[in-house]
Amino acid sequence: MKKYAAIVLAAGKGTRMKSELPKVLHKVAGTPMLGHVLGALKALKMKRTVVVVGHGSESVRAEFAGSGVEFVEQKEQLGTGHAVLSAMGALKGFKGSVLVLSGDVPLITASTLKGLLRLHNRGQGQGKKGAALSFISAILYDSTGYGRVVRDEQNSVTGIVEQKDCTPMERLINEINTGFYIFDSDFLQKSIKKLKTENAQGEYYLPDLISMAVKEGRGIRALTHIDVLEVMGVNNRVELSRASAVMRLRILKDLMLSGVTVIDPGATYVDATVKVGRDSVIYPGVHLEGSTVIGKECRIEEGVKITDSRIGDSTTVKSSSIVESSSVGKGATLGPFARLRPGNALGAEVRIGNFVELKKVRMGRGSKAGHLSYLGDAVIGSGVNVGAGTITCNYDGKNKFITTIADDAFIGSDSQLVAPVKVGKNAYVGSGTTVTKDVPAGALVVARVEQKIKEGWVAKKGLIIDTFKEDKKDKKKKRGK
Ligand code: UD1
Ligand code: CA
């Protein structure tokens, strides 16, 4: 079987991005561009994958540490040819085919790369040596910025000319080099050292190997790719947004074909890393991010943002809710306007209503906090009713404390639970109570000023206001004007 290694070029600064962040770390649908390229490569089962890093190499290495790739440093960015040269040391003694790809072409797919391998291997063994290299070209309506593919009268490729080196005639060529190549390792080892910098940018151009192979009479093959979006390089933020839009639609198409309803794919933002179960419905303006997993038959309404969370089957997340690093059981309802900060684990059938904020809350099956509450650092059992306006006072300015509410307790509206404090099973907290001491199971606690009635007090004070009369007076005044 043929052996393959890959070199991924990711050392460039990405000047045109105008950014502190290395270009290949800019995200497309939640994943850095380089991550998408490595993802496509993964399906090809490379023996080795060498990533050439340079600009911001520390952050690139950190991001992809443990992903099974090797890194080599290109200290000075002297061009794509020099970048490949930097990687050759790591591949010393490797015999087979070397795939070279750019880290800034995030839409590339495994199937296209497989096509390139197939093309390159076709007829291998017929000639003495087979093709020296194969590459992917594309026909673009606007080829500005790309290397142009130059062909002779027989339509055979003779070389690549970079934008800045093009004659006015060459500039009109709309077949471009996509930056994906596969080389015979012997040819690459030998030829990469021969590159020169006699060009407009004074750089070592990797594509010059194509004219070199042609001049040596070695075979080369070009795969002309028709999905021009797939091979689009990202060099600035306009292209970044374009690539993101294509990636988003690709992700949503897969979701829709797997049985998820997406009401408006143009206005729905789902990361490549997210999973959504069948018969779930996603409304416009929804953002699903990171490691989020949404179950089956869920309903995720307008303007909801869910990050790194698990949502159980048949759960509804109503409009404008935010969920971060939390898990929610089956058949629950959140929102509208619920805010789950990180660290919540909510059971099945819980109800979290409008303007309820949760942080590090464990809540058992069927418990409810319907309106206007802050619950933080709380352990809440099942069947608990947390009344409107309840607040856990979890912070004394220095430390955080736990509030524990046992099963089936009832917390009356507008109560404060001053942690650390426990409310026992089936206990009942009267409305407006400030709970400062533990409440035993089954007890009632009320802590508020007793109600006093003074009959006729308002009249005695001369404070009676007849709103209706006042209104009429006002209107008369206005009309009189
Ligand atoms: C390159 C090709 C061009 C092709 C285009 C396709 C060259 C000279 N030109 O141009 O023919 O049409 O890609 O997208 O190769 N890099 C390094 N070290 C360096 C220089 C670049 O690692 O010294 C990396 C970059 O990080 C990037 C990739 O190589 O991931 C391509 O470099 P870039 O500067 O974007 O090349 P283009 O001008 O797009
Ligand atoms: Ca590029």
Image (spheres, rainbow, N blue to C red):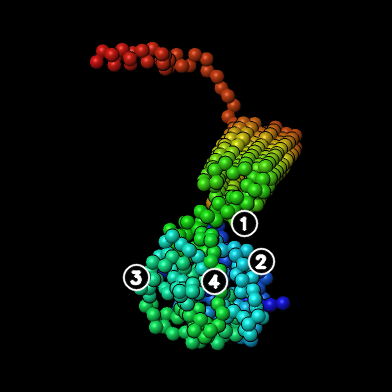
Is residue 290 or residue 323 the one in the foreground?
Answer: 290
Tag 1 residue: 273
Compare marks 2 and 3 and give the one earlier in the sequence. Answer: 2
Label 1 SS: loop
Compare marks 1 and 3 and give the one earlier in the sequence. Answer: 3
Left or right: 5 in relation to 191:
right
Q: Quadrant of the N terminus?
A: bottom right
Residue beneath the point at 66% across and 81% down:
125
Q: CA distance from mark 2 to mark 3?
A: 41 Å
Residue furthest left in the image: 481
Tag 2 residue: 43
Residue type indicated by callout 3: Pro
Residue beneath the point at 58% across and 54% down:
250
Is residue 7 or residue 110 the one in the foreground?
Answer: 110
Compare marks 3 and 4 and give the one earlier in the sequence. Answer: 3
Q: Can you tell which mark lies on residue 222?
A: 4
Label 2 SS: loop
Residue beneath the point at 42% across and 67% down:
173
Tag 3 residue: 168
Q: CA distance from mark 3 to mark 4?
A: 24 Å
Q: Which one is in front in this view, the residue at disc 1 or the one at disc 4? A: 4
